Image (spheres, rainbow, N blue to C red):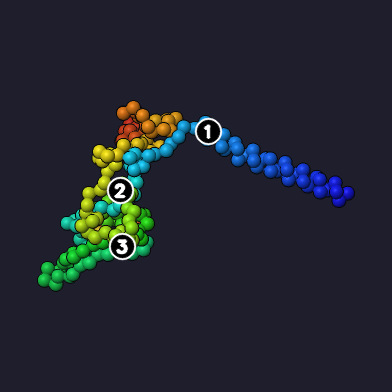
Amino acid sequence: MNFLKKVSDYAGEAVQAAKYIGQGLSVTFDHMQRRPVTVQYPYEKLVPSERYRGRIHYEFDKCIACEVCVRVCPINLPVVDYEFNKATKKKELKSYSIDFGVCIFCGNCVEYCPTNCLSMTEEYELASFDRHDLNFDSVALGRLPYKVTNDPMVTPLREFAYLPSGVIDPHDLPAGSQRAGSRPEEILATLEKDKPDA
Ligand code: SF4
Ligand code: SF4
C-alpha cells in the first residue's frame, strides 16, 4: 500500500510540474509572435506622455516666497530662503532650491503654487555621479527643460499611448499617423456639442 501511495504521489507531482512548464512556455510562445519594442537609447528616446511629471521648472521672478510649496510637500522639501524687509513689509527672496534626490515628483507644489511659478517638465534624465548634484538651486531650476523632439542627435519615438490602434512598434511609423483614441481637445469639443442648450 505504501509503495502504491508513493507512486501515486509521484505521478501527481509529475502532472503538476508538466502543467507549470506548459504555462511558462505558453508565455514564451506568445511573446515569440510579437514584434520587438526595443528602444536604442540614447540614440532613440521615447516622447514622454503629455502629463509626465519630470524635473520641476521654477521662475524666480514670479515667486512671492509664500512657502505654500513647502507646506503642501509631503516631505517639506523646497527650501525658500528669504529676508523680511520691515520697511516695505515684504519678503525678499534670496534663493530657492529643490533636491531631486529626495523629491518624489508628486506635483503637489506645482498644483498649489499661487503664482504658477512652478511647472513639471518632461525632463527625466537626472542621473548623476554625485547625489549632491541633484540639489537644484534657482538657476538650475530655471533652466529650460530638455526636449526629446528638439535634439538633432536623437530619434524621437512615440510611446505606446501615442501609437495608432494595434501598432506596437514605433519605428518606421509614417509621420502624421493618428494615435488611438481621441485627443483632449477632441473630447472637449464632443462634450461641448453634446451639452444641452441653456
Ligand atoms: S514634487 Fe512633491 S515631493 Fe517634489 S518638491 Fe514638489 S511637493 Fe515636494
Ligand atoms: S508656492 Fe510658489 S510662490 Fe510660493 S514660495 Fe513656493 S514657488 Fe514661491
Examine the rendering and report whether any part of residue 15 can be seen: yes
Calculate the distance from the C-alpha at mark 2 to the C-alpha at mark 1: 34 Å
At label 1, which amino acid type do we have? Met
At label 2, which amino acid type do we have? Glu
Q: Is mark 2 within 8 Å of ligand 1?
A: no
Question: Is residue 122 placed above or below 72 in the rendered structure?
Answer: above
Which image quarter is the C terminus in?
top left
Calculate the distance from the C-alpha at mark 1 to the C-alpha at mark 3: 44 Å
At label 3, which amino acid type do we have? His
User: Mark on residue 53?
Assistant: none
Closer to the camera, 169 or 115? 169
Residue 66 occupies quadrant: bottom left
The residue singled out by tag 2 in the image is 123
User: Mark on residue 32?
Assistant: 1
Percent from the top left, x then y, of residue 164?
A: 39, 30
Ligand 2, image quadrant it occupies = bottom left
Q: Residue at 36% across / 29% down in the picture?
A: 172
Mark 2 falls on what kind of element? Answer: loop
